[in-house]
Amino acid sequence: MTEKIKEKLNNLRLEADNAIERAEAAEAKNKKLEQLLLEKEQEINSLNHRLSVLDEELEKAEHSLQDAKRENMDNIGSKTTSEGLQRKIQLLEEELDAAEKNAKDTVEKLRQVDVKAEHFERQVQRLEQERDAWEKKYEDAQAKYQQSQKELDELVHQMEGL
C-alpha cells in the first residue's frame, strides 16, 4: 500500500516538474515574442517617421511644381524660357511621381508591419493564457502532492501506532 502511495507521490512530483518545465518554456517563448513585438513597434515608428519625411518632400515637390507652372505662365512669351520651364516642370513631375510611389511603398510596408505586430500581439496573449493555465496546473499538482504527503504522513503515523 505504501508503494502505491510512493508511486503516486513520484508521479505527482514528475507531473509537477513537467508542468514547471513547460511553464518556463512558455515564459521564455513569451519573452522572445515580446522582444520581437518591441522590434516591430520600433520598425513601425521608423516607417512612420520616413512616411512623414516623404510627405514633406512630396509637399515641397508639389509647391515647386506649382511655382514652376506659375512661372511658366508668366514667361509664356519667351520660347527659350518656356522650353526651360517645360523641362523643369517635367523634372518636377517626375520627382513628384517618384515621391508618390515612395510614399505608397512606405504606407504598404507600414500596413504589413502593422498586421505582423497584431499577429505577434495575439501570439503573446495566447502564450500568456497558456502560461497561466500551466501555472494553475502546477498549483493543482502541488496541492495534490501536499495532500498526498499529508495522507502518507498520517498513514505512517497510524502504522507506527500498530
Image (spheres, helix red, strand yellow):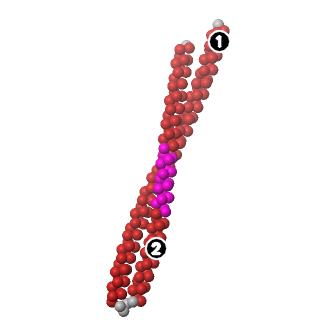
Image location of residue 111, percent across then percent down: 44, 59
| Amino acid found under the numbered disc labelled 2 | Glu
Q: Which residue is painted at 37% across and 80% down in the image?
A: 89
- Viewer-closest of 82 and 132: 82
Give the mark nearer the N terminus: 2 vs 1. 2
Q: How many marks?
A: 2
Q: Is residue 162 left or right of residue 55?
A: right
Q: What residue is shown with label 2?
A: 59
- Viewer-closest of 7 and 113: 113
Q: Quadrant of residue 136?
A: top right
Does the CB distance between marks 2 and 1 fall below 8 Å? no
Query: Most extreme residue toward the bottom, as rendered?
Result: 77
- Viewer-closest of 161 and 123: 123
Q: Quadrant of residue 66?
A: bottom left
Image location of residue 104, percent across then percent down: 41, 65
Q: Which residue is painted at 40% across and 66% down in the image?
A: 102
| Amino acid found under the numbered disc labelled 1 | Gln
Q: Which residue is painted at 61% across and 24% down in the image?
A: 146
* Magenta residues (range): 32-49
Image location of residue 84, percent across then percent down: 35, 83
Q: Nearer the viewer, mark 2 or mark 1?
A: 2
Badge 1 local density, few (<14 within 10 Å), some, or many (20+)? few
Residue 159 visible, this angle:
yes
Image location of residue 16, percent across then percent down: 54, 28
Report the quarter where the N terminus lies.
Answer: top right
Q: Tag on residue 158? A: 1
